[in-house]
Image: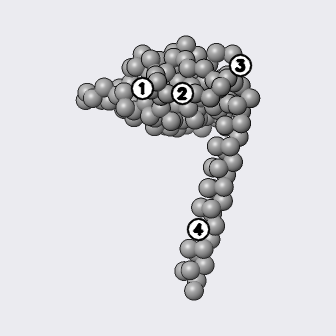
Amino acid sequence: MSENQEIPSGWVSVRLGDVCSFEYGKALKAESRNKKGKYPVLGSNGCVGFHDKYLVDGPGVVIGRKGAAGEISFVTENFWPIDTTYFLKLNKGTPLSYFYYLLKSLRLNQFEKSTAIPGLNRNDAYDQIIPLPPLPEQQRIVAKIEELFSSLDKGIESLKIAQQQLKVY
């Protein structure tokens, strides 16, 4: 969001770092994981395995820090974010699902530092000015996004059925 951009009445412009923090994940080597564990282990690109212990109470949002810098994952249960990630910590009263969609829209991968292994510095993300609507509006936005994704999923399913029927014909 540019600093000159107008926002709707009742919304505020805030620094991302003023309403949330990106906390560091913790190392968990593949050979140390219990593959039959019930808790997902999250890396920069999503689930990379399972373990019998967790580090963070779910649900949660995981942000790629190294490798797939800026990738955003949503996890519904307790989880273990590894050291190539950040996990999102929000101020109280802020819906996690709204921030999941907001972070995806910020395209945090644009801040990756081009080195041998791409990385995301959380301070670059913290400096982003974001529009923050009142809580009821955040809830309406999430509901509309999820409604649209549901419609899209139904459309994809219908397309797959049509493709199967075409093969029969």
Q: Earlier in the sequence, mark 1 or mark 4?
A: 1
Q: Of residues 96 and 106, which is closer to you in this image? A: 106
Determine the secondary structure under disc 2: loop
- Going by the numbered disc 2, the residue's amino acid type is Glu
User: At 71% across and 19% down in the image, what residue appears?
Assistant: 93
- Going by the numbered disc 4, the residue's amino acid type is Lys
Q: Which residue is mark 4?
A: 160
From this view, report whether residue 30 is shown above or below residue 158: above
Cβ atoms at labels 4 and 3 below 8 Å apart:
no
- Looking at the rendered structure, which numbered label has been put on residue 6? 2
| Quadrant the C terminus occupies | bottom right
From this view, report whether residue 22 is shown above or below residue 41: above
Q: Earlier in the sequence, mark 2 or mark 3?
A: 2
User: At 74% across and 29% down in the image, what residue appears?
Assistant: 136
Q: Which residue is mark 3?
A: 93
Q: Quadrant of residue 114?
A: top left
Q: Earlier in the sequence, mark 1 or mark 3?
A: 1
From this view, report whether residue 85 is shown above or below residue 17: below
Residue 91 is at least partly visible in this image: yes
Give the class, few, some or many, for how many residues have Cα within 10 Å of label 2's Cα (few <14, many ≥20).
few
Left/right placement of residue 39 relative to residue 62 reads right
Indicate which label's residue lies in the foreground, 1 or 3: 3
- Going by the numbered disc 3, the residue's amino acid type is Gly
Determine the secondary structure under disc 3: loop
Q: Earlier in the sequence, mark 4 or mark 3?
A: 3
Q: Which residue is mark 1?
A: 65
- Going by the numbered disc 1, the residue's amino acid type is Arg
Q: Earlier in the sequence, mark 2 or mark 4?
A: 2
**Extreme residue in the top direction:** 18
